[in-house]
C-alpha cells in the first residue's frame, strides 16, 4: 500500500512500523543490539530530514536507509555493545548465511518484486534471485520444532 | 556442500519459477534434472514455509521499551551507528594513572554522598515480558474484540451504574469511569474477560480515528512483577499499579499518545 510522501506525524508512523523495521534490521545485523541500532539510526535520519520526493513508501525508504547504515557499520568494524539475548527465531535469522535472509524477507514475506528488493539491497536482480534460492534451501534445513510460539 | 553449476542453475530456475519470475525452468535444465524436479520444488516450498513461519514469529516479539521511547521522544541522544574514529593513544605514565585514580575517588565519594542524602525512591517498574499469560490473554482479547465494530461493549456507556456494579462485583476492584474526552476519547461501554485465570474489567473507548483504546484492571496478585510499557506486534500496552489493582491501557501501537492517556486515566479511575 503506497503511503503519501507528506505524513502528519512521523513518530506515529515510525512506531507502528517498528516491529517490521526491527525484523528487517535483524537480517542485516549480527546481533539484537546491532539491529536496534540500525532501526534507531534510520528513524533518526528520517526525523532530521524530509522523506525524499522519490520515496513513495516510508517503510521501503527506511529499509534502504538501514541497509546503507549496515554497510557503513560493516566498514567500521565491530562495535562494543550491551549483551542481549535473542529468541530462538531471532537466532535463526541472525545465524543465517550473510545476505540470504534479507532477500528472502523482502521478496517472500514483504511481497516486493525482485527489482524492488534489488534496489533496497543495492544488488542486481540476479543476485537477489540467487540469494533467495539459497535462503529457501537454508530455511528448508531448519527443523520445524525450533520455532518459538508466542502470543 | 559443493554444487555443480547445473545443479545451481536448476535450483535457481525452480526458485524463480516459484515466484512467477519465469514461466518454466527451461527445457534443457528440466531434462537434465527431471528426476529431481519434484523433490527440489518440495524443498523450496518447505523452505518458504519455514522462513515465513520464522519471520511471522519474529513480528510477534515485543519491541523493547527503550527503542520505542527513543523513537517517540524526538532527537537521539546517541548515534545509532558508530562511525570509525581515530583511536586515541594515551601513554600511561605514573602521574597520569595517579591523577585518574584520585579523580575517580573524589567523584565516586561525592556521588555516593549525594545519593545517601536523597530519600529512598521506589524502584522503577520492571519491563518483564512477555511470557506473562495474563498479558498474552489481554493482547489476544484486544486483537479479537477491537475488530467487532458495533459490538465493542457488553454494557453500553449509557448504563454507568450497572457497569460499576457489574465489574466491581466480579473483579473486586473499586473504580470510577474516567472521562477521557480531553484526550479525544469517547467512552463506549464495558466488557469483562478472564486473563491469566483472573476476572478483568475493561472500559472501552474510541478515538476520532476509530481507534479502540481499552482500560483494563484486575486485582493484584502477590509477588507480581510490574511492567510499564511494551509493544507486541501492532498492539501497545501501558501499565501501572496501585496498592490493590493492576491497570493496563491497550491500543494500537500507532497511538502515540497512549502513555498520556494512561497517565490521565491513572489520575481519574
Image (cartoon, rainbow, N blue to C red):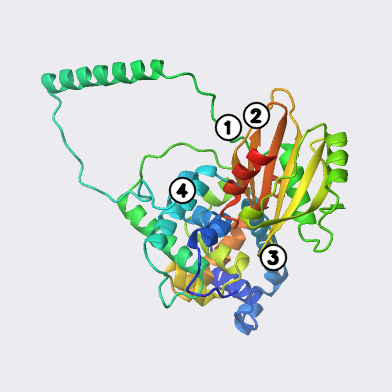
Q: Within the image, what quadrant is residue A52 found in?
A: bottom left
What residue is pinned by disc 3?
B45
Q: Are marks 3 and 1 in contact (CB under 8 Å)?
A: no
What residue is pinned by disc 1?
B126
| Residue lying at 16% horizontally and 17% vertically, measured from the top left | B98
Q: Are marks 2 and 1 in contact (CB under 8 Å)?
A: yes
Marks 2/1: CA–CA distance: 7 Å
Give the mark, 1 or 4, whose residue is nearer the N terminus. Answer: 4
Marks 3/1: CA–CA distance: 42 Å
What residue is pinned by disc 4?
B70
Point out residue B14 in the picture as x, y percentages from the top left corner.
63, 73
Name the side, left or right, on which A139 lies relative to B214: left
Q: Nearer the viewer, mark 3 or mark 1?
A: 1
Give the mark, 4 or 2, whose residue is nearer the N terminus. Answer: 4
Q: Is residue A93 above or below residue B248?
A: below
| Residue lying at 72% horizontally and 49% vertically, measured from the top left | B214
Considering the numbered disc 2 on the image, is that residue within a helix, a strand or a loop? loop
Point out residue B172 in the picture as x, y percentages from the top left corner.
82, 31
Badge 4 and badge 3 both on one subunit? yes
Subunit under mark 3: B
Marks 3/2: CA–CA distance: 43 Å
Q: Within the image, what quadrant is residue B53 found in?
A: bottom right
Badge 3 and badge 1 both on one subunit? yes
Give the mark, 2 or 1, whose residue is nearer the N terminus. Answer: 1
Amino acid at each position: 500500500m503506497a503511503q503519501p510522501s507528506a505524513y502528519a506525524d512521523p513518530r506515529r508512523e515510525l512506531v507502528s512500523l517498528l516491529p517490521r523495521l526491527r525484523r528487517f534490521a535483524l537480517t542485516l545485523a549480527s546481533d539484537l543490539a546491532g539491529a536496534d541500532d540500525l532501526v534507531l539510526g534510520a528513524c533518526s535520519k528520517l526525523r532530521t530530514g524530509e522523506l525524499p520526493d522519490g520515496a513513495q513508501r516510508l517503510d521501503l525508504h527506511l529499509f534502504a536507509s538501514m541497509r546503507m547504515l549496515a554497510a557503513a557499520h560493516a566498514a567500521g568494524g565491530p562495535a562494543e555493545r550491551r549483551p542481549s539475548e535473542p529468541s530462538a527465531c531471532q537466532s535463526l535469522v541472525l545465524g543465517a548465511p550473510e545476505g540470504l535472509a534479507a532477500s528472502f524477507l523482502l521478496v517472500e514475506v514483504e511481497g516486493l518484486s525482485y527489482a524492488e528488493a534489488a534496489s533496497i539491497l543495492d544488488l542486481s536482480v540476479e543476485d537477489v534471485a540467487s540469494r533467495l534460492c539459497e535462503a529457501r534451501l537454508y530455511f528448508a534445513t531448519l527443523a520445524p520444532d525450533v520455532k518459538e510460539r508466542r502470543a | 556442500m559443493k554444487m555443480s553449476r547445473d545443479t545451481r542453475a536448476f535450483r535457481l530456475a525452480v526458485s524463480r519459477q516459484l515466484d512467477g519470475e519465469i514461466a518454466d525452468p527451461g527445457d534443457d535444465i528440466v531434462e537434465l534434472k527431471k528426476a529431481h524436479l519434484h523433490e527440489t520444488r518440495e524443498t523450496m516450498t518447505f523452505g518458504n514455509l519455514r522462513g515465513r513461519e520464522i519471520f511471522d514469529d519474529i513480528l510477534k516479539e515485543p519491541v523493547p521499551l527503550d527503542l520505542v521511547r527513543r523513537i517517540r521522544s524526538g532527537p537521539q541522544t546517541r548515534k545509532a551507528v558508530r562511525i570509525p574514529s581515530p583511536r586515541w593513544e594515551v601513554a600511561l605514565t605514573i602521574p597520569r594513572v595517579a591523577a585518574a585514580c584520585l579523580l575517580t575517588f573524589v567523584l565516586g565519594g561525592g556521588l555516593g554522598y549525594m545519593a545517601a542524602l536523597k530519600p529512598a525512591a521506589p524502584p522503577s517498574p520492571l519491563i518483564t515480558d512477555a511470557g506473562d499469560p495474563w498479558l498474552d490473554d489481554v493482547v489476544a482479547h484486544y486483537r479479537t474484540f477491537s475488530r467487532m465494530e458495533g459490538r465493542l461493549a457488553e454494557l453500553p456507556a449509557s448504563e454507568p451504574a450497572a457497569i460499576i456494579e457489574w465489574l466491581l462485583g466480579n473483579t473486586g476492584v473499586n473504580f470510577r469511569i474516567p472521562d477521557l474526552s480531553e484526550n479525544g476519547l469517547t467512552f463506549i461501554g464495558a466488557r469483562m474477560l478472564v486473563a491469566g485465570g483472573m476476572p478483568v474489567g475493561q472500559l472501552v473507548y474510541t478515538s476520532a480515528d476509530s481507534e479502540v483504546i481499552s482500560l483494563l484492571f484486575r486485582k493484584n496478585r502477590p509477588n507480581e512483577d510490574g511492567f510499564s510499557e511494551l509493544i507486541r506486534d501492532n498492539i501497545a500496552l501501558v501499565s501501572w499499579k496501585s496498592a490493590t489493582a493492576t491497570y493496563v491501557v491497550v491500543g494500537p501501537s500507532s497511538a502515540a499518545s497512549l502513555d498520556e492517556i494512561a497517565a490521565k486515566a491513572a489520575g481519574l479511575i
